[in-house]
C-alpha cells in the first residue's frame, strides 16, 4: 500500500511543481524551492517503510528541489540556479532560527501544540547542522555539474544525462554529508550505513521519476 501511495505522491509533487511554473514562471520555481525546503524538513520527521526500505517521507519533496534547480539551469542560466540555492538555504536557516525561538515560549494550560511542534522542529543541533551543510554543498555541486555537462552536451537529447548525472552525484554527496553528521555516535555504524544506503537509493529513484517532468517543463509556456 505504501509503495502505491508513495509513487502517486511523487507524481503529485511533480505535477504541482509544473503547475507553479505554468502559473508564475521563474518566480513559481523560486517559490517552490522555498516551500520545498520547509516541507521537506517537516516531512523528514515521519518515518515510513517503502520498497522494503526504512525511509523518511521528506525524500520526495527534497528531490523536487534538485529538479527545480536543474530546471532553472536548463531554462535560464547558472546564475539564476545559484540564486535559487541561496534562497533555499536562507529560508531553511530562517525556519530553523524562528522555530527554535518559538519553542522557548512557555505554553499555557490550554495549549495543544507544544509537544507536536517540539517533535517537528526540536531538531538536535547536529541534525540541523547536517541538514544545512548538506543542502548548501550538494545543491551548489548539482548546479555546477549540470552546467558543466550542458556545456559539453548541450543537445536536448542529453537532457536526461544532465539531470540524472548531476543529481545522482549531488545526492550522493548530500547523503555522505548529512547521514554521518546526524547519526554517527547515535546509532551503530551498521545502522548508519543502512540509513545511508536506503536514503540514497530512494533519492536516485526520485531522480529517475522526475526526468520526464524536466522534459515536460521545457514545453510549458508560463502564463506570466
Image (cartoon, helix red, strand yellow):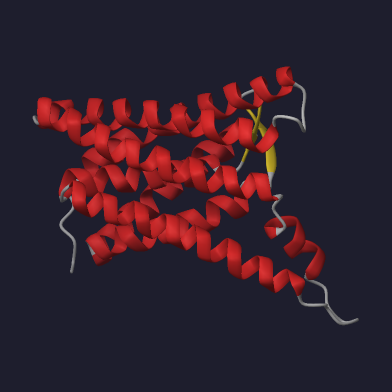
Figure quadrant of the N terminus: top right
Left or right position of 26 against 202: left
Figure quadrant of the C terminus: bottom left
As drawn, the residue found furthest toward the top would be: 190
Please name the residue shown 27% across and 65% down the image. 27
Which percent across, then down, holds residue 170?
39, 32
Q: Quadrant of residue 109?
A: bottom right
Rendered view: 157 above or below 39: above
Asked if residue 153 can be seen in this view, the reply is: no
Q: Nearer the viewer, residue 204 or 99?
A: 99
Rendered view: 106 above or below 82: below
As drawn, the residue found furthest toward the right would be: 109
Which percent across, then down, holds residue 199?
57, 29
Q: Nearer the viewer, residue 200 or 140?
A: 140
Rendered view: 1 above or below 36: above
Asked if residue 222 can be seen in this view, the reply is: yes
Please name the residue shown 51% across and 60% down the image. 93
Amino acid at each position: 500500500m505504501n509503495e502505491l501511495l508513495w509513487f502517486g505522491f511523487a507524481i503529485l509533487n511533480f505535477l504541482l511543481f509544473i503547475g507553479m511554473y505554468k502559473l508564475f514562471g521563474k518566480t513559481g520555481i523560486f517559490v517552490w524551492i522555498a516551500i520545498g525546503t520547509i516541507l521537506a524538513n517537516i516531512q523528514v520527521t515521519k518515518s515510513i517503510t517503502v520498497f522494503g526500505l526504512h525511509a523518511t517521507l521528506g525524500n520526495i519533496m527534497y528531490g523536487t528541489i534538485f529538479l527545480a534547480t536543474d530546471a532553472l539551469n536548463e531554462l535560464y542560466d547558472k546564475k539564476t540556479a545559484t540564486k535559487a540555492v541561496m534562497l533555499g538555504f536562507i529560508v531553511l536557516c530562517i525556519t530553523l532560527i524562528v522555530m527554535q525561538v518559538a519553542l522557548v515560549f512557555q505554553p499555557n494550560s490550554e495549549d495543544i501544540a507544544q509537544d507536536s511542534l517540539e517533535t517537528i522542529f526540536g531538531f538536535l543541533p547536529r541534525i540541523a547542522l547536517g541538514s544545512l551543510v548538506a543542502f548548501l554543498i550538494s545543491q551548489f555541486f548539482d548546479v555546477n555539474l549540470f552546467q558543466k555537462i550542458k556545456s559539453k552536451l548541450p543537445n536536448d537529447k542529453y537532457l536526461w544525462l544532465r539531470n540524472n548525472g548531476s543529481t545522482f552525484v549531488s545526492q550522493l554527496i548530500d547523503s555522505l554529508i548529512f547521514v554521518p553528521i546526524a547519526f554517527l555516535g547515535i546509532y551503530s555504524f551498521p545502522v548508519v550505513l543502512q540509513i545511508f544506503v536506503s536514503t540514497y537509493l530512494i533519492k536516485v529513484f526520485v531522480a529517475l521519476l522526475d526526468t520526464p517532468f524536466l522534459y515536460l517543463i521545457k514545453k510549458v509556456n508560463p502564463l506570466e
